[in-house]
Image (cartoon, rainbow, N blue to C red):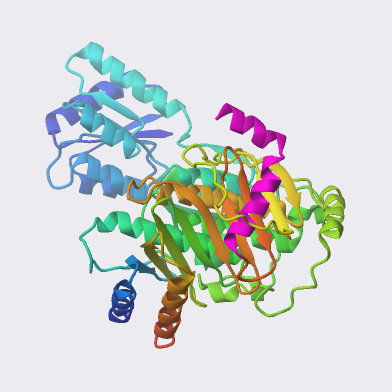
Amino acid sequence: MTTLLFVDDDLAFLESIQRVFKTWSTGTPLVIETAHSVGDAIMILQESPVTVVVIDIRMPVVDGLQFLRLLNRKHPNVQKAILTGYAEEEYRTACLAHGAALFLEKPRNTDEMKSVYAALVQLLEFPHTRGFSGVLQQASLADMLQMLCTGGNSLILQVKSHDGLAEIFIREGSVIHATAGNSDGYDAFYQVMTLRGGEFHTMPFFDPPKCTISNSWEYLLMESARLLDESGVLDGEESLPAPHAGPIPIPKTQRITSPLIKVVRSPFENGSLPAVPSYSRMEQEMETASIAIKPVRQRETVPIAFSAIRLAQKPSSAPSPLRLDELVVCSPDGELLKNVGCMNAQRRIDLLELFSNKMRQLGGRPEWGALEYLAIQGKDYTATVEFPAGVGAFGLVRRPLVPTADLRASVANAVQILPEFTQASTLA
Amino acid sequence: MRETFIELQRKIEMLPGVLRAGICLHNRMVIFADFKSPGDQAIDETIWRALADTIQVAHLHKLGSPRMCWNFERVKVLCMISEKGTTLGVIVDKNSNDELGDRIERVFRSALERTVF
């Protein structure tokens, strides 16, 4: 049985439409209900299942748009249609943006009534397919989340797995809340992001009962990637993702229960960093490791934007090239072009992508000018990030306070011999 | 707490060569006051938050306790982070040297000792 609920403050119209639609739907499982106010409609919705709610926009007390928002929160699975005498473009846009599947003009004669009836019956025949669904085997949930956040979307990402239902609330591109079983907040988010398989759906957004997550989505994804890395899944230690597999068991001590940075300890800080092997040995190890451990996956993320970045110029005083302990160079699409000494080049590429994105946020201010480079100074290392003519480059020396000019010169030398760089420079 | 950070911002902005400063807490809340020329606070909040996101993620990449310096054509943007995730962003004159960065860091660390952040 399917139920159409008309909500309108015009009693005469409600009586008319109920009478006509009942006649036309004789012999079908269609039930026509009417409500004279939003309050009446809510009572009907609470008492019996409704398939489609047809709403007038201009109603006293609570108007159609407010009711749409309410339905999104309280009854997200109910289809919504608008039937109005004010079919203006601004209303149409607003209603569709708030989850209405149809925006129809109120009928003024029998023919128009038939058109409305046909449109609503068609809507009833289709399952509620707002958004999309899929099986997470080839796609990564992180990629999906990144896409949704980058687009500034407001929605709920619902993930079903063998372990149950989980939801990630995204408001205007920011993750604000997550639930998974009895958990919520960061714990729930990381549980979802470390699932090895499942189904996902997007649902219309409604405000969660509380906001439990405040970190940026980049931070959350990086942390999820770290947890996945440490669980060994991405390194090929696990079999292919199983559709019904549960979350990867993460030792409780590694779970992030609050966004505090202090839970992440760098080996650099406690002095446990192993002795750095010589450059040539590291290169050999890297070449072997890249085949044996993990091929670098092809990226399908937002391309790194380099167009606004001018080529880093060599400093005027002659710099002394250094032996780099780490060098990762990638194309604008995030494809690895060169790796020396980095055991997880993909994470460096992720970092370069982040820097590139943030650089776009920071840049574009005429009073600052273009970005030349980013220098990073740690207790035990010095690093630079540059985006010369079409490539992203991360160079690191495991010594503090290394002159930036020397480090940049070494990175520039390494990048300039790459064919991709030469080609990009020529095109530029 | 807010007063402590506003005071920190004021102290840092008094250093020669510093153009502006802002603080972003571990929960991404931005603390910022217009001591200098009035600016669009919404834009500034975006900047401080972007700086904080970047340095936090770098931290996750085992680039521990970093101090970052975004070198633009006409300014430098320094960024440093506390153990507990509070981030300081400072826009400084292009010609300022590393000593200014060290001074700023000393003021920052010293202020943090007096807070739980």
Task: Give the camera-side residue of A220 and A376.
Answer: A376
> How far across and down, in percent of the image, does residue A207 sit?
36, 55
Using the rendered view, name the quadrant where residue A304 is placed: top right
Q: Is residue A58 left or right of residue A415?
A: left
**How many numbered marks have been drawn onto this rendered protein structure?**
0
Using the rendered view, name the quadrant where residue A190 is placed: bottom right
The relative height of residue A340 versus residue B29 in the rendered view (above or below) is above
Q: Quadrant of the N terminus of chain A?
A: top left
Q: Which residue is found at the position 46% from the left and 35% from the top?
A: A128
Q: Is residue A295 left or right of residue A56?
A: right
> How far across and down, in percent of the image, does residue A268 sit?
67, 73
Asked whether the viewer can see residue A295, the reply is yes
Task: Give the camera-side residue of A146 and A331.
Answer: A331
The relative height of residue B21 versus residue A311 in the rendered view (above or below) is below
Q: Which residue is found at the position 70% from the left and 43% from the top?
A: A336
Q: Quadrant of the C terminus of chain A?
A: top right
Task: Give the camera-side residue of B26 and A70.
Answer: B26
The chief SS type of the magenta part is helix
Q: Which residue is found at the position 47% from the left and 51% from the top?
A: A358
The relative height of residue A129 versus residue A329 in the rendered view (above or below) is above
Question: Which residue occupies the extreme bottom position in the image?
Answer: B114
The relative height of residue A339 versus residue A403 in the rendered view (above or below) is above
Question: Which residue occupies the extreme front position in the image?
Answer: A317
> How far across and down, in percent of the image, does residue A231 sit?
73, 62
Which segment did they paint magenta?
Answer: A403-428
Q: Does the segment drawn in magenta span residue A420?
A: yes
Asked whether the viewer can see residue A54, the reply is no
> How far across and down, in percent of the image, does residue A355 sit?
53, 52
Q: Does the segment drawn in magenta span residue A98?
A: no
Question: Which residue occupies the extreme top position in the image?
Answer: A111
